Amino acid sequence: MRSSNPVFSRRGFSRDNGTAGFTAAPQAGGPAVGTAQGNPYAQGAPANPYATNPYAQQDTQYGAPQAPVRGNVMTMDDVVARTGMTLGLVIAGATVAWVMDLSLGLAIGAALVAMVLGLVQSFKSKPVPAMILAYAAFEGIFLGALSNYVNTYVAEGAAMQAVLGTMAVFVTMLFLYKTRIIRVTQRFTRYLMIAAISFIVLTSVNLLFMVFAGGDGLGFRSGGMGILFGVVGVLLGAFFLAMDFKQVEDGVAYGAPREESWMAAFGLTLTLVWIYLEMLRLVSILSGDD
C-alpha cells in the first residue's frame, strides 16, 4: 500500500496490506501473517524496496524485519530530530511574522514561495534539506501573519485554540495508531483518497464562486456548512497523520536510507500545517457564531 501523501507515495516505504485488513500484513508490533499474499516477507510477496541493502536483514522465523545494523539507515530518532527542526522553523517564522505584524499581502507571497518549494521537493527523487527547511520557514511566516490577522480582527485567542487543537489531534491519532484502533489498509487509503479529492474539489469550486460571484461562494466556509466542512477538514488531516505514521514505521522497518528521515519530517509538517489551518478556520467560524 502506498501513501496518499505526495511526499511518501513515490518513495516505496509501504508494504502491501491487502484489503480491509483481512489478509493484511501487520503494522509493526502486530502478529506475523504466514501467507505470501499478506506477508511482504514471504516468498513471492512484494520486494523490500531497500533489499539491495545487505545489512537490512529479516527474521526468517517470524517473517518480520530486524533492525538494520549499520549507521546510515533511517531511525525513529532521526525522524523525530528532523521533524523537530522543521516544526521549529515553522514556529520561528510564525513568531517573527506575528511580532512584526506582517501584512496579509506579504504573507500570501510567503505562502506562494512555500508552495513552490513544497511542490519541487515533492517531485524530487531525493530530499534536499535546505529546500525543506526553507519551506518550513516561509510556511511559518505565512501562518504567523494569518494567525495574527485572525486573532486580531476575527476571534481573539483563535490562534492558541488552533494550536492546542492541532496538538490534541496529533496526540489522539498517535494513540489510536499505536494501540491499533486505527489500522492503515488499502481500503482505508482508497476511501481517504476519495474523500480528500472530493473535499479539495468542492473547496476549489467554492473559492471560484467567491472570486467571481463575491460573498461566501457556495457557503462551504461559513455558517453551518462551514462548520461541517471544517470538521471534515480536520478529520481528513487526522487520518493523513495515521498514514504518515505508517510510512515512517515502514521506512524504519525496511531500513530506508537515513536521508529519508528528511522526507518523513517534511510529510509530517505538511499534514500538521493542513490540520492547523483547518482548525484555525473552524475556530474562527465557531467564534463568529457566538
Image (cartoon, grey):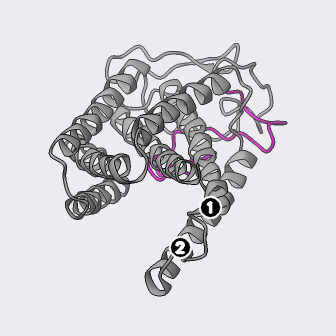
Mark 1, secondary structure of its residue? helix
Please say if the residues under marks 2 and 1 sit with CB atoms less than 8 Å apart: yes
Residue sticking out furthest to the right: 22
Residue 73 visible? The answer is no
Please tell me the numbered disc located at residue 216: 2
Name the residue type under label 1. Answer: Gly
Residue sticking out furthest to the bottom: 212
* Magenta highlight on residue 26: yes
Please tell me the numbered disc located at residue 223: 1
Highlighted magenta segment, given as a residue range: 1-27
Mark 2, secondary structure of its residue? loop
Name the residue type under label 2. Answer: Asp
Task: From the viewer's perspective, tell me whether residue 71 is left or right of residue 183.
Answer: left
Q: Nearer the viewer, residue 193 or 165?
A: 165
Q: Quadrant of residue 272?
A: top left
Sequence-wise, the earlier of marks 2 and 1 is: 2
Q: Nearer the viewer, residue 38 or 219?
A: 219
The x, y position of residue 44, in whole percent, is 70, 39
Please tell me the numbered disc located at residue 146: none
Residue 261 visible? The answer is yes
Magenta segment's dominant SS is: loop
Q: How many marks?
A: 2
Q: Residues within 10 Å of mark 2 (few under 14, many from 20)?
A: some
